[in-house]
Image (tube, rainbow, N blue to C red):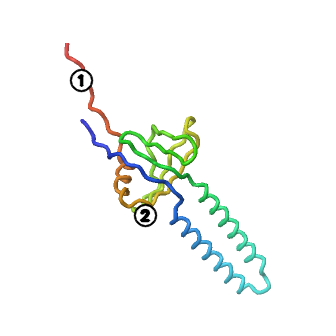
């Protein structure tokens, strides 16, 4: 039985604006809470100050991690995935991508680790990056590679 896989598609991987906006909002919220705590604490200001410093350190770390996110071109050829980074060697996958989060308008995907391809990579993709390719990408992520019909041995 021949199964039809998803058509070939490529999708540009770039730093996520959504994650950056969520990160800024979260840091702003956390600093606001720290400010309220500081205003209500009176002479006990060490706890709110430590919390604010921790928020700033974690926010800076998250920002650095977002900047280090992989950028390049993720492609499905109907049988396998490949990722061509902006700098470096292209990677070809014999294993399917794993879907870690699907919120319909964004996907968090994991490129499986292996000895030949190095560590696991994470891709956070958004529909807003390429709306015209989003449906094809989702079809490819959830499809299996096209399979050939079994060959029949001649009867003797």
- Identify the mark nearer the N-term, 1 or 2: 2
Figure disc tally: 2
Q: Position of residue 46 (x, y in %)?
A: 78, 77
**Is 27 displayed left or right of 49 in the figure?**
left
User: Residue at image x 68%, y 81%?
Assistant: 35
- Mark 1 Cα shell of 10 Å, populated few (<14), some (14-19), many (≥20): few
User: Under tag 1, what secondary structure?
Assistant: loop
User: Residue at image x 41%, y 61%?
Assistant: 127
Q: Quadrant of the N terminus?
A: top left
User: Under tag 2, what secondary structure?
Assistant: helix
The Cα atoms of the two marked residues, 1 and 2, are separated by: 47 Å
Q: Where is residue 53 in the image (x, y as percent from the top left)?
A: 73, 71
Q: Residue 128's mark?
A: 2
Among the 4 quarters of the image, the one containing residue 45: bottom right
User: Residue at image x 51%, y 50%?
Assistant: 72
Q: In this view, does 28 lie above or below 80?
A: below
* The one of 48 and 96 positioned closer to us in this rendering: 96
Which residue position holds label 1? 152
Residue lying farthest front?
Answer: 86
Contact, mark 1 vs mark 2 (Cβ under 8 Å): no
Among the 4 quarters of the image, the one containing residue 31: bottom right
Q: Is residue 23 above or below residue 73?
A: below
User: Residue at image x 41%, y 40%?
Assistant: 80
Residue lying farthest left?
Answer: 155
Q: Position of residue 77 (x, y in %)?
A: 38, 42
**Is 114 displayed left or right of 1 in the figure?**
right
Q: Where is residue 117 in the image (x, y as percent from the top left)?
A: 55, 38
Q: Nearer the viewer, mark 1 or mark 2?
A: 2
């Amino acid at each position: 039985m021949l199964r039809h896989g998803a058509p070939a598609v490529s999708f540009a991987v770039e730093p996520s604006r959504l994650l950056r906006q969520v990160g800024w909002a979260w840091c702003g919220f956390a600093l606001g809470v720290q400010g309220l705590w500081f205003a209500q604490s009176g002479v006990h200001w060490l706890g709110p100050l430590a919390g604010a410093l921790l928020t700033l350190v974690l926010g800076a770390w998250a920002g650095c991690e977002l900047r280090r996110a992989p950028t390049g071109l993720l492609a499905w050829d109907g049988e396998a995935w490949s990722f061509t980074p902006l700098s470096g060697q292209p990677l070809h996958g014999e294993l399917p991508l794993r879907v870690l989060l699907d919120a319909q308008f964004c996907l968090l995907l994991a490129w499986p680790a292996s000895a030949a391809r190095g560590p696991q990579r994470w891709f956070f993709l958004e529909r807003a990056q390429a709306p015209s390719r989003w449906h094809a990408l989702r079809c490819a992520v959830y499809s299996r590679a096209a399979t050939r019909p079994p060959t029949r041995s001649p009867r003797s």
